[in-house]
Amino acid sequence: MKIDIGCGTQRYEGYTPHDWSLDHDARYLPYEDNSLEEVRASHVLEHLPKGDVEETLRHWVSKIKPGGILRIAVPDFDEIVRLAALDRDSEDESKPPFPWESYIMGGQTTPYDSHRTLWNYPKLKHAMEQQGLIDITEWKNDYSGTNSTKRECSDHVFSLNLAGRKPGVAAHDAPPPKYPDMRAVMTMPRLAWTDNMFCVSQACMKIGIEVQNSIGVFYGQGIQRVLESCVAAENLKWALTIDYDSIFDWKDIVCLRQIAEDAGLDAIAPMQAGRERNVALFNTVAEDGSVQPARAEDFAKPWFPVSTMHFGLTLIRLDTLRKMPKPWFKSDPAHDGTWNDGRMDDDIYFWRKAKENGWKIGVSPKVHIGHIECMISWVTPDKGKEYQSMFSWLRGGKPWYVRNREQVWRMPTSLRPPEAQG
């Protein structure tokens, strides 16, 4: 079976329509996993909320059988900008103006006709690769059908059309590899997240990895001790550092190792968000020492070089580590003697020393892992619920809307607003 998502009134021979006009949700396909020959979504993805895109792509791919095709078309932001610039500079006043605003923001003729995400080639290709699709190529609309004379969105000059194939063997059917030459290492307090412990044990058991832990308050001392034990074991090739609040599965480890070995990396880490902040845990630094943002095109690659990264699920080549002088980890206070901004943390010291010793390190946009974070839930004025991080609570107390509401209800009755009296 082939599915055409967001087809509107268009009908192509051999495709089953799946559209909001038929009371269908593009984010959900009511079919068995690994059952569809093809999923086609022409100018659908840009209409979905940003937070739904990754999960929707994952859902679509899960429904496609091994060897099947996911075919996507979206407005190409880069091409629209290029065409808009040509139109702006054109001296032909007889031409109608190029409708670049509608192509970017949507026609907005109905509640469904607004664009909520922007796309270009690197971003779409990366998003498809993240879901395991391979052989990603461009495609043209060459289908016949009852409405084949009607122009379809994927025919437009500004349309970016990419198709990817699901690997011939379903990921869950492929037997996991075994890695007796790898050891996972951790350092943590005596009490830790149960979710993380189950995650570590399940992932490492699946691929035959021994886990070694060091208990202690001082991270640098603990992690160096367990890494020293790995270096001393001649049969080990890789050490895998795991943080006590990381969430991942065995496939993440397999992917990291494959990329590291293919690229000859000395260390590789996945994409992981920082706790209580909207940043990924890596830095890229220029030769002059200034921090540089990662480029959009970097995220279309299996990995890209960085200067520092996190130890949440980091693979380290032991032959390289054996050659690096000790100490591997060391913390230093700031110039004013405090442990505030300007201090040197253990992990930053490690990566700076690795750079001095010529290490080749990078992060992989193909692998994303989770970060456990404590959140507090509060009832909002409209009886809904919002979340506040512990970081925010410790530094600022209750959210403003909670404080304001409490102040009203703690006033004498005579001073309350009419709606709060009684």
Image: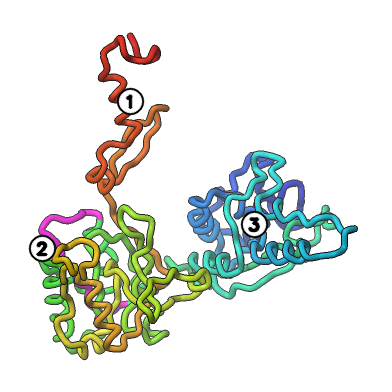
> Which label sits on residue 251?
none
Q: Residues within 10 Å of mark 1 (few under 14, many from 20)?
A: few
State the residue in front, 274 or 191: 274
Which quadrant of the rendered structure holds the C terminus? top left
Dots 3 and 2: beta carbons under 8 Å? no
Residue that numbered label 2 is attached to? 217
Point out the frontmost of discs 2 and 1. 1
Which quadrant of the rendered structure holds the N terminus? bottom right
Point out the frontmost of discs 1 and 3. 1
Residue that numbered label 3 is attached to? 41
Q: Is residue 399 left or right of residue 349?
A: right
Q: Amino acid at mark 2?
A: Val
Magenta region: which residues?
A: 178-195
Q: Is residue 256 visible?
A: no
> Which label sits on residue 405?
1
The answer to whether residue 22 is above or below residue 214 is above
